[in-house]
Image: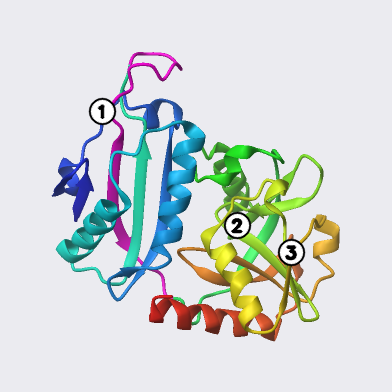
Amino acid sequence: MIVFLNGQFVPEADAVVSIFDRGFLYGDGLFETTRVCDGRPFLWGRHLARLRHGAELLQLNMPLSDAALTDFAAQVIERNQMPDSVLRLNLSRGTGPRGYSTKGCEKPTIAMSLHPAPELENAKSIRLITANQPLASDDSLNQAKTSNKLTNVLARSEADAHGADDALLINTHGDVAEATASNLFWISGNTVSTPPITSGAVAGITRGFVIELCQRLGLTARETAITPAQLTSTEGIFLTNSVQGITEVSTLDGAPIPQSPLTARLRGGYTEALRAGH
């Protein structure tokens, strides 16, 4: 595979980053992951906007313009002949003097890589558990995709240990926030709900798109808090992220979850938009 690294295209084996890079040392960086369909990164402009917002939040210099990033993304897709794939973009503060201070960190590290894309059609449903690992609510860093994801890593380890596919993260107020790599939605009647960003959930790009999709399909979309106990009495649950799109939940902590026809309707609308490129 050919990887983009700091303005150059190099073989994967030669894409080397310093062991003193702050992304490695402290998780001092950001990342974006997007689905590529027919050579086009889906919702790319929104991903770049979130990346820039995250860079402002972390006071991290962006080394390239949006136009340059778009051009380099197109080139890495073309060079690898992977028009249907997953594109990951990583940005770190780069190297600098030892310690937490950002003084002397003048050259950020930026990389893009491609990965195989999972099938959207006939995707299997997800078995969820509730993680014991708590998630901080009202954390401003949740507005960005930071490289420090230890809470999510530990929660996913819990899911793996229990034979589940993913885990729900509960915030410090006792409300559901998100899954380890996805935003959460549930269905009651014709209303599709999701936890607010203040719950601790990441401001997912697909999350925002699904809220818009609900409006297009004549469904009510709202943001509201919910406890794990309340979640089990809903008419359907699904997860969203940029790689899998919309994935239905079949069980939560071993209890079966109803399968709502609205989930399939939303998944169809999402897949149609992905293939159309908007």
The residue labelled by disc 3 is 254
Q: Choose mark 3 or mark 1, whichever is in front.
A: 1
x and y, in percent, of residue 235 in the image: 78, 76
Q: Secondary structure at mark 1?
A: loop
How many residues crowd mark 2 within 10 Å: few (<14), some (14–19), many (20+)? many
x and y, in percent, of residue 97 in the image: 34, 14
x and y, in percent, of residue 229 in the image: 85, 59
The residue labelled by disc 1 is 18
Q: How is the image coloured?
A: rainbow
Q: Which region of the structure is painted magenta?
A: 97-119
How many residues crowd mark 3 within 10 Å: few (<14), some (14–19), many (20+)? few
Residue type indicated by callout 2: Asp
Residue 163 visible in the current orientation:
no
Q: Is residue 248 left or right of residue 101?
A: right
Residue at x-position 50% and y-position 46%:
145
Q: CA distance from mark 3 to mark 2?
A: 12 Å
x and y, in percent, of residue 154 in the image: 59, 41
